[in-house]
Image (cartoon, rainbow, N blue to C red):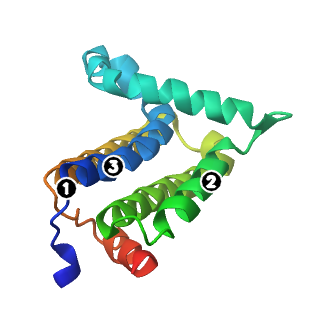
């Protein structure tokens, strides 16, 4: 389709890459066991450290009585100030929406797993959590690379849903 071609400027490419950091940060708790088993992978996550500090600061500010709404406020800000802002290029808005959708999918899996965590055998649970962690990271890294190259990242179903929202 014609919407899948881009002539994004270098600054647009940079801003299109940044939203994918959020789903990566949200996926980190799912990878704690993997990262403890394979400590040689931990240095690969060092570029996320400054973003993790800022994210935890923002989410910490907006936590009331153990209930944090910081992540939700970040989602709302990205959606209303970036995705719905037509003065921002389509390339940035599309990638922002796609990163939001990755985060939503991750949150849905987390909600489904939370009530049944104790009932699952530990090996099965750890396999699911590692798959969520790796799947999120692979999707985000793929999207970051494609965005840096000025291309629209084609993630099945998510790309079409993001395009419908951004039009």
Q: Residue at x 47, y 66 (%)?
A: 83
Q: Nearer the viewer, residue 137 or 14?
A: 14
Quickly name the residue at label 3: 15
Q: Quadrant of residue 98?
A: bottom left
Q: Which residue is mark 1?
A: 9
Q: Quadrant of the C terminus?
A: bottom left
- Residue 111, numbered circle: 2
State which tag comes first along the sequence, 3 or 2.
Answer: 3
Which quarter shows the N terminus? Answer: bottom left
At 51% from the left edge and 32% from the top edge, which residue is drawn? Answer: 29
Frontmost residue, 106 versus 75: 75
- The residue sitting at 39% across, 18% down in the picture is 36
In this rendering, the answer to whether 102 lies above or below 132 is: below
Would you say residue 42 is visible in this rendering? yes
Q: Return the x and y of residue 74 as percentages of the image width and height.
A: 59, 48
Q: Which residue in the rendered view is the most extreme toward the right?
A: 65
């Amino acid at each position: 389709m014609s919407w899948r071609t881009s002539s994004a400027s270098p600054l647009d490419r940079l801003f299109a890459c940044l939203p994918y950091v959020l789903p990566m940060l949200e996926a980190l708790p799912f990878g704690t066991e993997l990262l403890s088993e394979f400590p040689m992978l931990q240095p690969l996550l060092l570029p996320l450290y400054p973003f993790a500090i800022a994210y935890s600061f923002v989410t910490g500010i907006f936590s009331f009585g153990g209930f944090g709404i910081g992540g939700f406020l970040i989602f709302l800000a990205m959606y209303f100030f970036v995705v719905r802002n037509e003065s921002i290029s389509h390339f940035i808005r599309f990638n922002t929406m796609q990163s939001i959708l990755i985060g939503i999918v991750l949150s849905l899996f987390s909600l489904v797993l939370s009530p049944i965590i104790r009932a699952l055998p530990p090996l099965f649970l750890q396999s699911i959590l590692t798959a969520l962690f790796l799947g999120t990271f692979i999707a985000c890294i793929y999207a970051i690379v494609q965005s840096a190259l000025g291309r629209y990242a084609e993630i099945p179903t998510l790309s079409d849903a993001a395009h419908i929202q951004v039009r």
